[in-house]
Amino acid sequence: MITIAEAQKYYDDTDSAHDFAHVRRVLTLAERIGRAEGADMEIVRAAALLHDVGRAQAVAAGRDHAAFAAERTREILAGRPAERVEAVVEAVAAHRFRTEPAPATLEAQVVFDADKLDSIGAVGVARAFAYSGARGEPLWAPADEPNGSHTPRHEFAVKLSRVKERLYTATGRALAEERHAFMVAFFERMAAEVRGEV
């Protein structure tokens, strides 16, 4: 439906936490999960490749980036079979953690899980620090004392620690276990180092 090279033209890589390298990792995870779960892989691949298209423009305009990406996806895939395009659009629209719609189709659930898996584990920790640093946030603040900041520790407390519970597929949930454990251990160790205990 769309190739990696074609999709890459729609990304500008100004946000290292949501750049095309992120899209490639989500694609790899979505392919792994989709094959294991028996999903329509053409829909999964297209949705994974386009799930964050136009993200920077959407955020700058104060819009939900998933809804914006869904609209752009419909435009990008125009001329292809309408039913298949709408399946991709639905998966793109439902990939966000904090907003509706919830992913209702298997393909949407696969893409949701793949995107969320890239937000946890070692890569997830690195992305949280990259995103926070780009926004000028401090390296650390206790989770119960945000002082107006949203550090990676806050992102862990608010979202990342809950990701594994929100996954839809059995394959995604299995992949999340080790990533979650690593992330918990990382933030526990960092807290201990900040307190000067180790």
Image: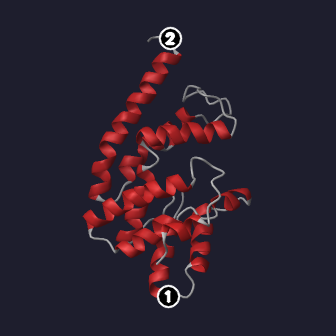
On the rendered structure, is 174 left or right of 148?
Answer: left
Q: Nearer the viewer, residue 11 or 52?
A: 11
Q: Nearer the viewer, residue 5 or 161?
A: 5
**Which residue type carries mark 1?**
Ala
Name the element at disc 2. loop
Regarding residue 101, the answer to whether it shows in the image is no
**Residue identifier under label 1:** 82
Q: Going 45% across and 11% down the picture, which residue do you hit?
A: 197
Q: Nearer the viewer, residue 56 or 102?
A: 56
Distance, label 2 to label 1, CA atoms, is 59 Å
Q: In the figure, residue 68 lies in which quadrant? A: bottom right
Q: Going 47% across and 88% down the picture, which residue do you hit?
A: 81
Q: Going 55% across and 35% down the picture, which residue do you hit?
A: 152
The quadrant of the image that shows the C terminus is top left
Figure disc tally:
2
Name the element at disc 1. helix
**Residue identifier under label 2:** 196
Can you give x and y, in whole percent of width and height, for residue 97 in the image?
49, 55
| Earlier residue among tags 2 and 1 | 1
Can you give x and y, in whole percent of width and height, for residue 172 in the image?
32, 54
Image: 70 above or below 80: above
Image: 127 above or below 85: above
**Residues at badges 2 and 1 in contact (C-beta under 8 Å)?**
no
Q: Callout 1: few (<14), some (14-19), or many (20+) C-alpha neighbours within 10 Å? A: few
Regarding residue 64, the answer to whether it shows in the image is yes
**Which residue type carries mark 2?**
Gly
Which color mode does the image show? secondary structure
Can you give x and y, in whole percent of width and height, for residue 109 in the image?
38, 64
Can you give x and y, in whole percent of width and height, for residue 141 in the image?
59, 26
The single residue placed furthest to the top in the displayed view is: 197
